[in-house]
Structures are given as structure tokens and as C-alpha cells.
Amino acid sequence: MKNFLLFVMLFLVSVSYSQNIRFEGLILDNEKMPLEMANVMAVNQATKAMDAYAITTDKGKFVLNLKAKTAYVIKLSYIGMQNKEVAVITQAENIIQNIIMDAGGIELDGVEIVREMPVSIKGDTIIYNADSFKTGEERKLEDVFKKLPGFEVMPDGQIQVEGKKVAKLFVNGKPFMEGDTKLGSKNIPSDAVDKIQVLRNFNEVSQMKGLENNNDDIALNIKLKKGKDKFWFGDVSGGLANDKGYIINPKMFYYSPKTSINSIVNFNNIGEVSLTSADFFRITGGARNTIGRSGTTLTLNRNFFGLSGVDNVAKASDKFGTLNINQSFSKKWNVTGFAAYSSTFNRTITNSERAIFQPNTTEIATLENRDNRTDSRNNAFISKLGSKYKANDNFQLDYDVFFRKNGQEEIDNSQTNFNSINNGVVFNSSNSIISFQKQDPVAFNQSLNLFYTQNPKSTWVVEMQHQYEDEDPFYNPQLAINPYQNSTSSNPDDPSNIFVNENALNIQQSRFVKTNKIDVKIDYYYQVSNKSIFNVTLGNTNAFQSYNSSILQILQDNTVNPIEEDAYNNDVRYNFNDVFLGLHYKFIVGKFTFNPGFSVHQYNTDNTQFSTPFQLNFSRFLPDMFARWDLKKSENLTYNFDVKNGFNDVNSLVEGYIFTNFNSIARGNSQLENSLITTHRLVYSKYNLYNFTTIFGNIAYTTTKNPVVNGILFQSIYSTSDRLNLDAENETLNGNLFYSKSFKKYYKVTGGITASWNKNFVLNRRLINGNTQEFIQGIENVNHGYNLALATQFKKYPNIDLGYRINFSEQAATLFTTQSPTVKLNYYFLNGLNINWDYSFNRFKNETTSVANDFKIMTASLNYIKKDTKFEYRIQANNLLNTRSRLNNTFNVNGYNASENVILPRFVTFILKYNI
């Protein structure tokens, strides 16, 4: 490995070495004033290729790295100026030359005057010419993004630009698949892309631009090449692999001035997941979420049982299809329809070791070894219909309706063996468990947003959202050995005093949770002057939830023992109401923007359980502050401060016990109070188009007073817990720093630092000499990680991506390190062949015990597509080393868990692709 890396570095040096000279100077107007963000490009007269380009600084400076003894044409453009060309013949010495541009340029529709420039600027929009950055091996839009300066493709598929997450993706001005960047970047073919527009200070509602603090919001618009904007395009691919593997993946797109249609289908069993469960939740269908900024958070805990990610599954199949239609019926009215269906099957096989500590120590009280085999199925359907009516520049009305339905089933077979230490005596035990889970939850959301500009100084905004959810989780654990039999507990609510004393235990638990939540908010903005705005907000959040649960014990003779005790049944109604009034004043002084304000809330909550009501009625003053310092056009420092009230939903309030797993029962607390969350956040952002450098950093400090925690009582591997407020204050300090730079046209280097410190208070209970004792612990965790990567962008040589990441985690005086070097090779040659090779290595080490675990994964592919043909041939190999398992380790105050997951085997797939 070390020899290979040395070879790669020597290769990079050798291919990049040549005698270069610097051509630099100033771009000025007729009055000798510098032109900021002018476009400068050097075209090699012999090859007609672009050898270098630059964007001028605020002082008009540019620098081009050119080949010595070469003839060039230097092309310049600047909006409002006449285009200019200057002939230059380089020698062996650097050149310094100032260039004057003449006024009188004509701005054409779009950015035609800079169509040849790799990067150009028009107001708040940065335009990248995609062909200027392509090296030939790109297949998807994601591959192009990776080549652009300032762009980063995150591991979850989301896109960041200038260190900021992209809010929405458009194609030819129309939202692609609800604006989801992951679906777009992984499916839009790269050869269809002409321009990539970065829309900074993005706001979908033109009337709201400048009124809201959306300076950091970014969207992307993909301009299609001519011939792709009025006809169907896309591709259809299919392939077969060993072990009966297959993939079928048609993608079809149609764009015209009034209509766009996007369709993506993917059937496969080789581990390619089109849309994860997290993606389904992310695509909520709502374009705005300003109601959530009111100062109140009501956390709705969905009862979905988690589905394993494809990285940790032994077997997987995915059936996915989505359709997105945008139709402009007129210049004023646009309708969007979106629907997606996913059907997945995952099998996970896990061997794990779990340790439970003695209270206030890291001495092991219980050590458990468990073997699991879990089969899970998830059928999910989401759909949205949206309407946007913009009568004129002063009036816009949006309506969206969103529907989601899931069907989930999970069967788990496990064998557990454990030993417990009590007063120095070791007890050994084992159990076999078969558990079944099933649910069919439904969610329905709708929103209505109205924007009305009464006059140049007055703007009204009305926002209404309605959310309905219906959940019905069913859980059936069957234990070969009843862990609660023959107990002598004096607690009447102890499971041993509730269930019939049999050798085995078979439980059926049903739950029904319904949620109705309505949010209404009215904003009035009054523009006092061009640099000051007064905002008044009146709003209301009203939520109603019902929660019903019951438990049955199926006896060994198949008769039913209904558990009728109140401690194991729930019939709860919960009402939450928040009426608030907010006042904010935004004003600009020089390069500074300030927006201080506050909101006053009146809260009323009530829930009744076991004929006992509990109410909360109180008022709260919540201040907030936004401040921004624009040092330059692309450099700013932002400070945010806010105080929020955090409330829990009905799932945390129910007093009746619920089986959360076969070995844990939990209940809530009807008298839970809110937590007070205070956050300070400082963000620095700089994007320099002169030297294509991105720097993004942030640091945040959060305190949570009166936090809600679980009070847990462990008895060997079995636990009982409840929810309660602690008279304490949790603290979290975290930050990150990101750096990216593209240089000498062919190289891109990125690096980053992440760090976090938190101190959280937890409550643990232990049974000592027959008595329950409580231990409140303040636990400190420290994490810090570092990463560095270098990528090349050659057109004639192999491209190499080198990456290295190391992370340090210290918990309860135990230090863990994770090291992850990666190597990627991409080579496009012979006008049609493309080789991809990807290798990653992961080492997890407990520095305290010196125990280390290694994990290696390798993928490779060979593509061939002949120029001007529509067929493409591909051989790809996933998990080329046939690595059989992945190790995962977690650690908390109660103990640790070390698990080994069987992963998908090696698949070698032959794929035929037809480009439409």
C-alpha cells in the first residue's frame, strides 16, 4: 500500500511538471478603475484548447499559469463592457501586463457573452460551463459536481457549495424530483448538462428576497444542452451478475418550455439503493419551513422501527420507481406532481458482544453475546401535488398536499448468551428469541402559503400547515425462556407479578398513535427604509394526539391472558397549544446586518391518564438575534442566537409500560415539562473566485436546561426505564472547518477538521442488596477528526483521488481512533474506454486496550462506449475482495457494544446500456 501511494505521488509530480510562466496584471475600465470578477481565459493557438482561466479580484488582479514559448489569445469579458482579445506569445520569463476594457458591451439573454468562459458571474449567480471541467469519464451529474471548484458531494449524496448545503435542485428552472439533490446528481446524465448555475441568496418567493435572512441559502439550476431541452433523453440499462444478481435501471427525461417529465426506475439485488428510509423522510414536499422558526419545538417521535442500511446487510433487493411532472398552464400558474414507490428487502446477520457496566465505573456487570438474523421488508409510497399561482409581482399563492404510506415487516431470530456478576457471584444464562414487528403508518400533510405585497413598503405573508399521522406498530416477541419467572419482586407492577409464570414468554403488543397538528402564522413586513425592515408575527400551533396500547400474553396452551393492569395499558389524549407574538427589526449599517427580536408565547398543554389530569399553563419570553458582517461579496461572518422551548410528544408522556425490545420495557411520564434550549452559532464563509478557494467554518454552543432523560434500571440484560426531567444543564460545543482549493487547472485539494465536546447528565438505577439506588452522572465526551484529500482532473492521464481521515473519540477515559485512507483511480483512454477503481481501508482501534479491527472494501469497473454510438458496455465488481463482514463499535455511559455484520458478497455484473 505504501509503495503504491509513493508511486501515485511520483506520477502526479511527473505529469504536472513542465516549464510554466506566470501571466498576470490588472483588468481596468476606461477610467483606470479595476473591474472585479471579470473573466479572463487563455486559448492555446496551436491546440485551440483552453490552457488557463481566471476571475479578477476586487482590485482587478488576475494570474494565469501558461506554457512557455507558446502563442495564446487572451479572451476577456465583463458584463457592460465590450469583449476583448489580446494576442500573447510567451517566452521563458513571467509577463506582467494591464489590460483596459472598453464600455458598451451588450448583455444578451442569459450569459451568452461569456459562453466560452469556464466560470462567469451575473449578480448573485455563478455559472459554470460544464464542458470546461469534464475529463471524459463522467457518467452522472454527480461526477461533474466533483470537478467544480467550491463543490463537494457528501457521503449521503447531498451537495454542498461554498461549504453550504444546497437547498434545492432545478433543471431548466423547474424543480427536479421535488428539488432533491441526491436523486438529481445520481441520475441526470452528464452529457446532457450545459451550464450549472449556483443561485446564491436563494428564495423561491421573489417578494421575500431581502425580507428574510436567507443570505446563506443556495440552489442549483442545471441548464440542458440544445437538443436535450425539447426531446426525450436518458438511458436504459440492464445487467446480470453472479449468484443470480440483476439490475434494471431505465431513466427517462423530457423538457420543454411548459412541460417537464422525469422518470427513474431501478430494480436490483446487488446492493444499489435508490432511496433510503432517511431520503423518504427528507422529501417532505414542503417548500418553506418558517413556522418551525417560531421558538418552539414539538418533537413528534415516529414509531418506525429502523431498517438497516445497505452497508451492513447480507442480502438485499430494491424495487424503486418515481415520476415527476411539472406543467406550466400559463405564465402565472404552475402545477407539480411527484410520486415515488420503493419496495426493499434486507437480511442482516449480526454477531455482537454487549457489556453493561457497574454504576459509576467501567467494570463489567453483565456480558452478553448475541447472534441475530433479521429479515425486514419495507414498502413505501410518497406523493405530492403542488400548485404555484403568481398573479403578478405582488401576489403569489402556493398550495401543496403530500401523502405517505409505509408497510413494514420485520422478523428477527436471535440467540443470546450472557453472564451477570452479583456480589461476586457469576450467573450464566441463555435465551432464544423470535420477534415479529409490523405496521402500516399513514401520513398526510398540506400547506397553504400566501404572499401579498400591499405597496412598496408593506408585505403580508400567511402560512398554514396541517399534519396528520396514523401509526399502528405491532410487536410480538417470543422468548424460549421467560426471564421474569420465579422472581420475588415486591413491586406489583414488576413483569414477574403481571405475566403468568410459565417457562416461555409470548407477548403481543398493539399500539395506535394518531396525530393532528395545525400551524398558522401571519407575518407583516414594513420597510421603514431601504436598509431597515420591521416585522410583526402572530402565530398558533395546535396539536392533538391520541395513544392507545395493550398487551396480551399467549400461553403455552394457546389460550390468551389479557394484561388488564393499568401499568401495562395506555389510553391517552394529549393537547398542545402555543399562541405567540413576535417582533423583529432588521437594519443595515455599512457592511453589517442586524436582526434582533423576540417572541412571547402562551403555552397550554394537558393530558389525562388513569383519571388523573395534568396541565401546563405558562408564558415564556424567547429572545433571538441574527447578525451578519459582509467583509466582501463572497466573504461573511454570521452570528445566530436563539432560545427555544422544547416539548415532547405523547410517546414520552404515556404512563403505561411498553416493550421497546424483547429485553426492555419503558414508560413515559405524564408530568414532563419542557426543556429550555439556548444556542449560539458563529459561521464564517469565504469563496474566492480569484484563486478558487473555499473556506467554511462554524462553531456552536448549546445548553439544555431541565433536559428529559431515561432513568434506566438494569437487571442483567433486561432493563426497565421511564422518562423524567433532570434538574441539570447539558452542554454541547461543536465546530468544523472546511477548506477546498482548485489550482493549476488540474488539481483540487480539500481538508477539514471536526470537533465536539459535550457534557450530558444521565440517571442510572441499580438493584443493590434488593434496594433500588439512583446514580446521576455527568458524562463528558470529546471527539475530533481530520481529513485531507487530493484529486486530479487530467484529460489525457489517469486521474487519482487520494484521501485520508482520522478520528479520535474519548469516552469515559477510553480513547478510540478510526483511520480511513482511500484511493480512487479513473482513466479515460482510447476514445471510449474508462477504468474506475476504488479502494478504502478502515482501522478502528481501542487505544486503551490496543485491540484493533480492520475493514477493507474494493470496487472496480470497466466501461466502453464508442463515440457517436448509443450503446455502452460495462463490467463492474462490487466488494472485489469479497470481504465478508464489517465491524461496528459503540460506547456509552452504560457500556459498550461491539458487533460484526455480514455484508453483501462480491458481485460481478455485466451491464448493457442504451443512451436515448
Image (cartoon, rainbow, N blue to C red):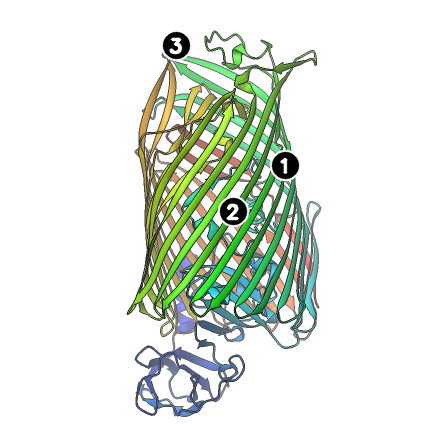
Q: Nearer the viewer, mark 2 or mark 3?
A: 2
The amino acid type found where label 2 is placed reads Asp
> Badge 3 local density, few (<14 within 10 Å), some, or many (20+)?
few
The amino acid type found where label 3 is placed reads Gly
Residue 549 quadrant: top right
Q: Where 754 falls versus 713 (above or below)?
A: below
**Residue visible at 34% across and 23% down?**
363
Which disc is residue 770 wearing?
Answer: 3
Instruction: Find out whether the residues at labels 2 and 3 contact each other: C-beta distance under 8 Å.
Output: no
Residue at mark 3 to residue at mark 1: CA–CA distance? 40 Å
Q: In the current view of this chain or complex, which residue is farthest to the front? A: 454
Residue 614 quadrant: top left
Give the x, y percent position of residue 647: 43, 37
Callout 2 secondary element: strand
Residue 173 quadrant: bottom right
Instruction: Find out whether the residues at labels 2 and 1 contact each other: C-beta distance under 8 Å.
Output: no
Callout 3 secondary element: loop
Compared across the picture, whether 764 is left or right of 663 comes to: left
The amino acid type found where label 1 is placed reads Ser
Residue at mark 2 to residue at mark 1: CA–CA distance? 35 Å
> Badge 2 local density, few (<14 within 10 Å), some, or many (20+)?
some
> Badge 1 local density, few (<14 within 10 Å), some, or many (20+)?
many
Give the x, y percent position of residue 429: 51, 16
Compared across the picture, whether 136 is left or right of 768 comes to: right
Q: Quadrant of the C terminus?
A: bottom right
Residue on which the image places disc 1? 376
Nearer to me, 567 or 756? 567
Residue at mark 2 to residue at mark 3: CA–CA distance? 50 Å
Residue 881 appearing in the image: no
Residue on which the image places disc 2? 519
Which disc is residue 263 wearing?
Answer: none
Give the x, y percent position of residue 409: 65, 34
